[in-house]
Image (spheres, helix red, strand yellow):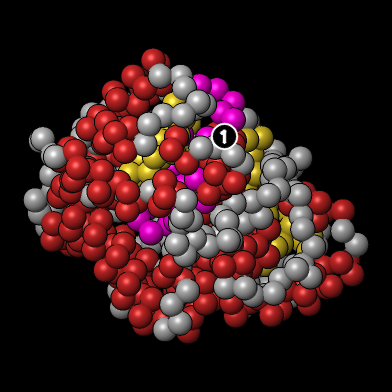
Amino acid sequence: MKIPKDDLIGVLAQFNPWWRGEPVADLPAWRRAAFRELHAWVAAPPAPRAVLVSGARQVGKTTLMLQSIAELIAGGVPPANILYATFDHPLFKLAGIEAVLEAWRAREPALPGPEFLFLDEGQFIRDWGTWVKHQVDFFRHRRIAFTGSALPLLEAGQESGVGRWHTIKLTTLSFYEYLQLKRIPHSEIPPLRSLRETFAWPQDAFYRVAEMAAPLVGHFHDYLVRGGFPQIAQVESVTQAQRLLREDVIDKVLKRDMTVLFGVRRVLDLEHTFLYLCMHDGGLLDVPNLCKNLEVKRPTALKYIDLLESTHLVYKLPPHGYGKDILRARYKVYLADAALAPAALLKGKGLIDDPVALGVATETAVFKHLFARYYARDVRFTYWRDKKNREVDLVADMGGKLVPFEVKYRAQHAGAAELQGLLEFMRERKAERGYAVTKSLGDFGPLAGHGGVMRIPAPLLCYWMGQGELDEPIEA
C-alpha cells in the first residue's frame, strides 16, 4: 500500500533519535548475556550473514538491538547509517520494507561506511525470508539484524536461508541474569567454567559454597514465580506481574499472533490446549487424553502444539534412542518459562507452597538453562525412559558424549535409591558423568559410592548455567 513518504519519515524520526543527536531514552545499562553475540555479528560479522534474534514476546529483543545501536554510535559509526524500524507498526507494515528504506535515505543521506539495519518483528515483512536472502547476496555493505517473536516462514524458508542468517535464540532471563537485573548481591559465589570442575573439589568446598548460596534460595523461588521476562520481573507485586504476563505475553500470542500469522480461527481451542500443557508442564505428551478432554481431533491438537512451539511458548523434547521404539514414543513438553503455568492458571505464589508444582517448575527452569547455554553448540537434548519406567529427565548428547541430568527437587536427600534411573542410564550407555539436580543446599557433592554422579542444588546449577560470559562446555 502506498503511504506518503512524509508520514513514514515522521514515524521513523521518532524511532531513530540518534539522527537528531539524541540518545535512546531509558535504555538500561545492564546487558543480557546474548548482547555480546549479537554485537559481534553486527559490528564485525564472522561471515556475510544477517542475524536473527528469535524469542518470545517481552524477552528483551528490542532492548538488545537498541543497546547494539548505542554501542555502534559510541564506536564512531555515523548515526545516519543506522536504521531502526519495527514492523509491528501499522504504517511500516502497510508500506513495506523498500518504502521504509527509501524514506530513511530521503531523511538521512548515506555517509561512507557500512549501513546497519535493525528490523523489529521481521515476520510482518512481506516475504521476509526472500528479502533477507536477496539483501545478503547482493548488498554486502549492509549489516542486517532482525527479530521475530513468531516465525511462520522460518521452516518453509530454511533452504533459502542456509548461509544467509545466523540465529540467536533468546530465552527468558536466566537466574544469574535475574539476580543482576534485580541488583541482588551474589558476587561471593565462585564462578565455574565447567560443571566437571566440581568433581575435583575438596569436601569443605561444597560446605563453603552452599553457605554462600543460602541467601539466594528465596530469590530462586521468587524467580520461578515471577518469571524471566525482564520488564515483568521488576514489578513488585507478584499478582500484578502474573497479570501482565497473561496480558502482554500469553494473550497476545494466543489471540493476536496466532490469528494474524497462522490464520487460527478456533482461538478458544488453542487456548485450552495451552492451558492443558500448563497443567502437564514437563510431562509426557498424552495426545489421546488431550483430544478427549478438549474435544479436538488429533491433527488439530498436534498442529496447535507445533504453533505454540513456533511462537516460543513451549519446547518439545524427544525421547532418547533410535529405531521404531522412538517413533512410537511420546514427546515431553516444557513451557518456555516456569512462571507461565502459575500465571495462566492464576496460582499466585501458591506454587512455592506446593512441593509437586515447585518440583515441576524447577525441572522446567533447569531445562531452559541448559538449552539456553548449549543450543548453539549443536547439543541435542532428549529424555530417557526404559521398560521398567526408570527415567532420566534430560540427556545432553554432545557429539556422541552423553551427559544425563535428573531433577530431584524434594525435601529428602537424593541417594542411590532415588537415582536408580540415572545410575541405570549411565551403566547402559557408559556415560562417564551424570548430575542430580537437588533442592537442599546440603544435598551438594558427589554421590557416595558412585563417583561419576554429582549432586548440585538447582539454584546453583541455574546460577552457573546463566553465566553467559563463560564459554566452556558442560564437559571440558
At a point 29% along the width and 69% down the height, the residue shown is 246
Name the spot of residue 447 as percent of width and height, x first.
76, 61
At a point 65% along the width and 44% down the height, the residue shown is 403
Report the residue marked by disc 1.
43
Confirm whether the magenta stretch covers residue 65. Answer: yes
Residue 374 seen in the current view = no
- Name the quarter where the C terminus is drawn: top right
- Name the quarter where the N terminus is drawn: top left
At a point 57% along the width and 56% down the height, the residue shown is 31
Of 257 and 26, nearer the camera is 26
Relative to 404, say whether 188 is above or below. below
Residue 460 seen in the current view = yes
Of 279 and 271, nearer the camera is 271
Of 144 and 445, nearer the camera is 144
Q: Secondary structure at mark 1?
A: helix
Name the spot of residue 100 as percent of width and height, x first.
26, 36
The answer to whether 17 appears left or right of 321 in the picture is left
Relative to 304, say whether 2 is above or below. above
At a point 62% along the width and 73% down the height, the residue shown is 183
Amino acid residing under circle 1: Ala
The answer to whether 276 appears left or right of 468 in the picture is left
Name the spot of residue 261 as percent of width and height, x first.
19, 43
Name the spot of residue 218 as percent of width and height, x first.
60, 80
Q: In the rendered picture of this protein, how many numbered marks are placed on residues?
A: 1
Q: Residue furthest top?
A: 138
The answer to whether 426 appears left or right of 165 in the picture is right
Confirm whether the magenta stretch covers residue 391. Answer: no
How many neighbours does mark 1 have within 10 angstroms: few (below 14), some (14-19), or many (20 or more)?
A: some
Q: Which range of residues does the magenta coloring cover?
A: 42-69
Q: To which quarter of the image does residue 350 belong?
A: bottom left
Q: To which quarter of the image does residue 319 belong?
A: top left
